[in-house]
Image: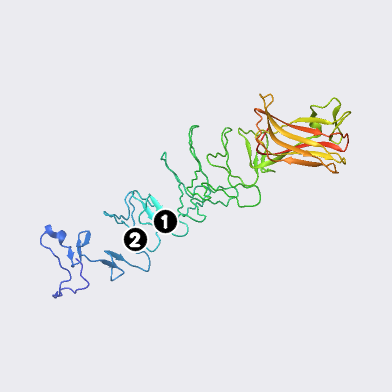
C-alpha cells in the first residue's frame, strides 16, 4: 500500500464538517442510492437528473423566461448531435393545437441533410396554412427557386390526381397589371414557361399549359409578349408534329389580331396574306359596307321598238344617236343589269348630251325588276323623267335615289334598264345618249 502524500505517517485525523453526505449507506442493498443527492432543486439518480420544482432553468442568464432558457453571445447556444440511422437528434412534440417548435427573429439554416415534414402543413408567413406548403408575403417575392446546375428544375411540381393541377397560379388583386404566373428566361434559346402533357395515347386530351381568367376587362388567360424590336421573335409560338393536329386551337368567343396576318407566309404584305388557296364555308363579310358602281355605256344598250325608218347608231366615242328618214325620231333602249346577290341599290343615274339650240330631248329612264315566272308584271325600282334644254356643251346627268325594293335577289328576279329617247323632229349629232350608272353597296364578298 502506498503512502498518502497529503498525510504524514501515523498522523492523527482531526474531526471536520462533512463534505459528502450519503443519504443511505448501510447495506449493499442500498449502495445504488448512496450517490443520490437532493439539494432542493435537482435530484441525481443514477444516470438521471431531474427537477420537480415549477421554476425555470437559465444557462447564460439569471432570469430565465422559459423552462430552459439558454442565452449566449459567443457561439452555439444548444448543440445536438446524433449518429442513429432513423431516430432524430432533436424531437419536439405538442399534444395540443400549438406548434411543437417555433423559430423567431432570425434565420433557420439547414446546412446538410434534408428537412422532412411527414405529416401536417408548413406555413411561411402564415400561422394557418391551408395546404401542405403555404407561403405568404406582403411585399416582394413569396417563393423563389433557383437551379444553378447545368440541368434540373428550379421548381418541379407533380400531381397524380386525375383532376388535379401540378402548378396553380392565382392573383387576387382587382387592379393593376398583376400576374398569376410569370416566367422569365434570359437565355437566347431558353423557355420561360414550359408545359408538357405526356398523356401516352391518342385519345388523351391533356394540356401542357393551361391559362384561365375570370376577369372581364381585358384580362388574359395566357399572355405572351416579345419585347425585342429586332429579329423575328414570337410572343406566342405553337407547334405540332402531327399533320392532323393544331399548332393553335381556339374555341368560343372571338379572336383578335393586330397588324398583318400571314397564312403560309412569314412576312405578310397585307392585313391578311394567304399563300395558297383559301376556302370559306360561309360568306366573307366586310366590317363596313363597301360602295361600288356599275357603269353601263351606250354601246351596251340595244334598240327595242323603232319606227320603220328610225335606227340607233353608235359612235366611236361611246355614245349613241337616233336617226331616221321620217318624224318623229323616237326609240326605246334596253340593257340587262348584273349586280351581286345581296347588293343594295342606292342610286340610278342617266347621262346625256344636248347642245342643239332650240331643240329638246324627252328622256324616261327606268331601273326595273321582273320575276322569272311573270310575263308582264315588273317592279319599277327607280325612274328618271326629264326634258333637256339644248344649251349645254358638256355631258349632263340626272339621278333618282328613292329606290323601291333596293336589295338585289338574283334567285327569282331579273334586272334591266330601259331608256325611252325622243328627239322630236331633230336629227342631230349634238343630241347624244351616253349611258347609265347604278350605285350600290355590299357588305360581303360575292363570287
The mark total stands at 2
Percent position of residue 151, x then y: 52, 47
Q: Nearer the viewer, residue 252 or 323?
A: 323
Asked if residue 202 lies left or right of residue 334, the reply is left
Say which element carries label 1.
Answer: loop
What numbered label is drawn on residue 37?
none
Percent position of residue 81, x then y: 34, 57
Q: Nearer the viewer, residue 267 or 109?
A: 267
- Per the image, the residue denoted by label 1 is 136
Does label 1 or label 2 sit earlier along the sequence?
2
Asked if residue 423 lies left or right of residue 247, the reply is right
Q: CA distance from mark 1 to mark 2?
A: 31 Å
Percent position of residue 266, x then y: 66, 42
In the current view of this chain or complex, which residue is farthest to the left? Answer: 26
Quarter-wise, where is residue 311 in the image? Answer: top right
Quarter-wise, where is residue 242 in the image? Answer: top right
Asked if residue 187 lies left or right of residue 205, the reply is right
Percent position of residue 303, x then y: 80, 28
Q: Nearer the viewer, residue 48 or 313?
A: 313
Q: Where 294 sits versus 105, above or below?
A: above
Q: Nearer the viewer, residue 265 or 260?
A: 260
Q: Residues within 10 Å of mark 2 (few under 14, many from 20)?
A: few
- Per the image, the residue denoted by label 2 is 79
Q: Report if residue 113 is visible in the image.
A: no
Amino acid at each position: 500500500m502506498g503512502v498518502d502524500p497529503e498525510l504524514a505517517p501515523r498522523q492523527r485525523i482531526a474531526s471536520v464538517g462533512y463534505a459528502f453526505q450519503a443519504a443511505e449507506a448501510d447495506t449493499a442493498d442500498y449502495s445504488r442510492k448512496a450517490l443520490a443527492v437532493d439539494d432542493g432543486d435537482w435530484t441525481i439518480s443514477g444516470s438521471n437528473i431531474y427537477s420537480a420544482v415549477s421554476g425555470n432553468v437559465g444557462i447564460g442568464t439569471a432570469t430565465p423566461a422559459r423552462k430552459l432558457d439558454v442565452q449566449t453571445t459567443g457561439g452555439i447556444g444548444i448543440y445536438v448531435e446524433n449518429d442513429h440511422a432513423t431516430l432524430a437528434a432533436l424531437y419536439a412534440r405538442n399534444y395540443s393545437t400549438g406548434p411543437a417548435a417555433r423559430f423567431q427573429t432570425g434565420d433557420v439554416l439547414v446546412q446538410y441533410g434534408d428537412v422532412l415534414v411527414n405529416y401536417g402543413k408548413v406555413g411561411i408567413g402564415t400561422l394557418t396554412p391551408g395546404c401542405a406548403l403555404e407561403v405568404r408575403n406582403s411585399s416582394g417575392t413569396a417563393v423563389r427557386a433557383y437551379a444553378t446546375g447545368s440541368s434540373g428544375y428550379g421548381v418541379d411540381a407533380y400531381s397524380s390526381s386525375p383532376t388535379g393541377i401540378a402548378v396553380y397560379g392565382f392573383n387576387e388583386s382587382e387592379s393593376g397589371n398583376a400576374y398569376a404566373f410569370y416566367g422569365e428566361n434570359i437565355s437566347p434559346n431558353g423557355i420561360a414557361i414550359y408545359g408538357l402533357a405526356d398523356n401516352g395515347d391518342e385519345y388523351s386530351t391533356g394540356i401542357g399549359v393551361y391559362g384561365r381568367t375570370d376577369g372581364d376587362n381585358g384580362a388574359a388567360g395566357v399572355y405572351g409578349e416579345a419585347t425585342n424590336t429586332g429579329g423575328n421573335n414570337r410572343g406566342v409560338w405553337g407547334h405540332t408534329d402531327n399533320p392532323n393536329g393544331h399548332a393553335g386551337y381556339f374555341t368560343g368567343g372571338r379572336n383578335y389580331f393586330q397588324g398583318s396576318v400571314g397564312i403560309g407566309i412569314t412576312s405578310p404584305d397585307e392585313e391578311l396574306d394567304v399563300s395558297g388557296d383559301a376556302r370559306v364555308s360561309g360568306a366573307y363579310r366586310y366590317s363596313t359596307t363597301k360602295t361600288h358602281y356599275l357603269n353601263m355605256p351606250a354601246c351596251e344598250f340595244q334598240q327595242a321598238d323603232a319606227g320603220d325608218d328610225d335606227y340607233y347608231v353608235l359612235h366611236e366615242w361611246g355614245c349613241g344617236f337616233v336617226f331616221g328618214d321620217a318624224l318623229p325620231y323616237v326609240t326605246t333602249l334596253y340593257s340587262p343589269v348584273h349586280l351581286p346577290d345581296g347588293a343594295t341599290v342606292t342610286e340610278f343615274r342617266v347621262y346625256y348630251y344636248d347642245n342643239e339650240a332650240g331643240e329638246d330631248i324627252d328622256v324616261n329612264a327606268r331601273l326595273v325588276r321582273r320575276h322569272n315566272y311573270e310575263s308582264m308584271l315588273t317592279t319599277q325600282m327607280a325612274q328618271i323623267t326629264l326634258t333637256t334644254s339644248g344649251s349645254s356643251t358638256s355631258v349632263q346627268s340626272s339621278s333618282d335615289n328613292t329606290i323601291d325594293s333596293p336589295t338585289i335577289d338574283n334567285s327569282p328576279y331579273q334586272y334591266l334598264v330601259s331608256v325611252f329617247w325622243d328627239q322630236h323632229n331633230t336629227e342631230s349629232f349634238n343630241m347624244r345618249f351616253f349611258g347609265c350608272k347604278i350605285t350600290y353597296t355590299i357588305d360581303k364578298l360575292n363570287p
